[in-house]
Amino acid sequence: MGLTEEATDAEVVRAVLAGDAERYAVLVRRYRDRYARYAARMLGSIDAAEDAVQDAFVRAFEQLAQCRDPDKFAGWLFLILRNRCFAEQRRRRREGRSLEPGDEAVASPDRPDGAVVQADRTGALERALERLTREQREVFVLKHVEGLSYEEIAQLTGATVASLKMRMHRAYDRLRELLKEHA
Amino acid sequence: MSEPFHPLVKRLLDGELSLSELPPELVAQGAEALRLLGAVDRAPVSLPAALEARVMVEVRRRARSRLRRAWRWFVEPLDVEVRLRVRPWAVWGGALAAAAALAFLLARPTASPDGARSVEAAARDSVSVRFVLFAPSAKHVSVAGTFNQWDRDAAPLMRAGASGVWTLTLTLPVGQHQYAFVVDGERWVADPAAPGVDDGFGRQNSVVAVIAQGARTL
Amino acid sequence: MRGAFVAVALLAGVALRLAAQEDVATRLDRRVPPAVVREVEELASSAVARGLPVEPLIQKAIEGGAKGVPAERVIAAVRALAARLEAAAGALRSSGIESPAADVIEGGAYALGAGLSADEVAELARSSHEPHDPGLTLRVAATLAALGVPPKTTLELVRDMIRAGRAPNDILSLPAQVQAGMARGATPAQAAQGLGRAAAHRPPGRPPDRIPPGQAKPKPHKP
């Protein structure tokens, strides 16, 4: 029985669990870029996103037996990636790499934040996003970058729609404030 | 300091209203808000193809050591296996069968873990176990333990409505397992409802005893 | 019959020694600091040479790494575990079990760590004739002792259950039942002794009224 690229996620997962580890590559190819943008926006650079996505795939393989519903591999992989992003953000906070509130200009070219320097594009808004709380940043990215509805975000993250809207609205105000400072 | 956006403008940003539906005095603010959103970088991100190769290197490594571990499990507790399943008068038959099965494994070094797992499955069923934690102010809860290499990202719990209760159902092999909850990614919390054992690091792990299906539970 | 198993065990031993080294580095890579990896590699070689299991050492190191425990503390814990594994193997061998299985040695190590003596470990293993798995029996004993049941009472309870012909599942249920007794106000010792008496009087195969079989075991936490 040959597993082609058209095999469903569940079929590939079952094949891998039965011992055919090489088939896992199908899932990696399939989902490599799907959450790359989310990770890049959460961590501020493509390099950091690459590390996080790679790590998430490896962990997902290690825990494949725990993926209760092989059909939901994609969502489960997302949760692992999400936690990985949070872990990375925590690590940066511990090492003092993120900005303190009240720092000067949001977009300062010689700021010593190695992670962000790489993906320097729209600049000001990206910097401002980094200054949001993790929850605010995530809901903003999921809605306005990934285009999910509040209901979809609620399903994905386990938060209620009401609390998501509250976070988002605070994020809007905070962004306005941060970008006004810059201007 | 700047003024917060008007609630109607926030709804505009949420996509629930259009600019033309705003009252005239809010149109300017609405346009400013939309410009803010317009600066969002939505460009799709493509990761290097090399990522797949790097992932598969790690995957192969783990698959190899998993094979060896499955092999070890099959090989070492053979005597236990016989004791569990074989009556005294069938000892010869059992021993021969076990030796034959092992010879089969040895002759085929690329034997899939399936062979070992079928023996494992015969000896140990897997059972659904529900983990529950009441943590209303937590933002994230996961469970980590001997069954998932203490990976605090591998088994996130989901909120059960707004009650403050978090749950997750996992399938675990029969036997005893140690675990703990991880709250907000950092706080390791023993299960208040389960027996605790010293983890050797000054904390407590919780213990869950998984019983074969069909047996009575407490 | 024994010959077949001995031959098999020898073959397995060679494969194990080769596998152990690569395993440690692979499994611990990026999960624990390099100092811990080196220490565990050394302990693993030594363990394999002495016929002791390596997996518990790796698991303990992974646990420490996952919990963010400082390297020195992880090393200390893994060393302590290695010592207990050795002590457990010694106790088991001197009790007449010539080649104790890895699982049983590990169970013995937990039991020693929970406060049971080497003699009690040996006695528990000896009592665990088929269909009982001594590795499981020892782990349950360790959990009972961790709950606060005195070691002697633990030993008696488990032995009585086995003698009364109870199934391995019933042994596995003991910690939860002792906990339930404690929730009703009994001390761990009292709860355990009550269970021992009940085991002696009830014929096997007739469990008390409980949740019907087949249901997942709920673990509710009351606020």
Image (cartoon, helix red, strand yellow):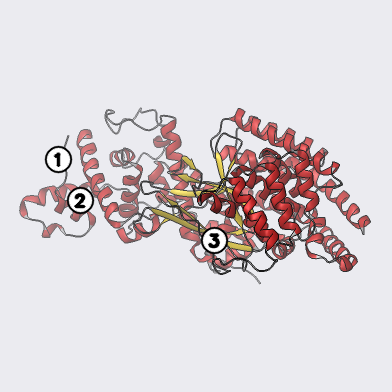
Mark 1 to mark 2: distance in Å? 16 Å
Where, by quadrant of the figure, is residue B71 drawn?
Answer: bottom right
What residue does disc 2 label?
B34
Q: Nearer the viewer, mark 1 or mark 2?
A: 1
Residue under label 3? C217
Q: Is C2 situated left or right of C43 in this image? A: right
Residues at discs 3 and 2 in contact (Cβ within 8 Å): no
Residue C214, image x, y percentages: 57, 69
**Amino acid beneath label 2:** Leu
C187 to the left or right of A48 = right
Is residue B48 visible in this depiction of the protein? no
The location of residue C19, given as percent across then percent down, is 76, 45
Q: Residues within 10 Å of mark 1 (few under 14, many from 20)?
A: few
Q: Secondary structure at mark 2?
A: helix
Q: Amino acid at mark 3?
A: Lys
Residue at x 61% of width, y 41% of height: C62
Instruction: Judge the density around disc 2: few (<14), some (14-19), many (≥20) Cα neighbours within 10 Å.
Output: some
The residue marked by circle 2 belongs to what chain? B
Give the quadrant of residue B101.
bottom right
Residue placed most toward the observer, A85 or C121: C121
Q: Secondary structure at mark 1?
A: loop
| Count of number-bearing discs | 3
Rendered residue at 73%/44% (across/down): C108
Q: Give whichever of discs 1 and 2 has the lower sequence position.
A: 1
Please tell me whether mark 3 sits on a helix, a strand or a loop.
loop
How much space separates mark 3 and mark 2, taking CA atoms? 52 Å
- The residue singled out by tag 1 in the image is B3
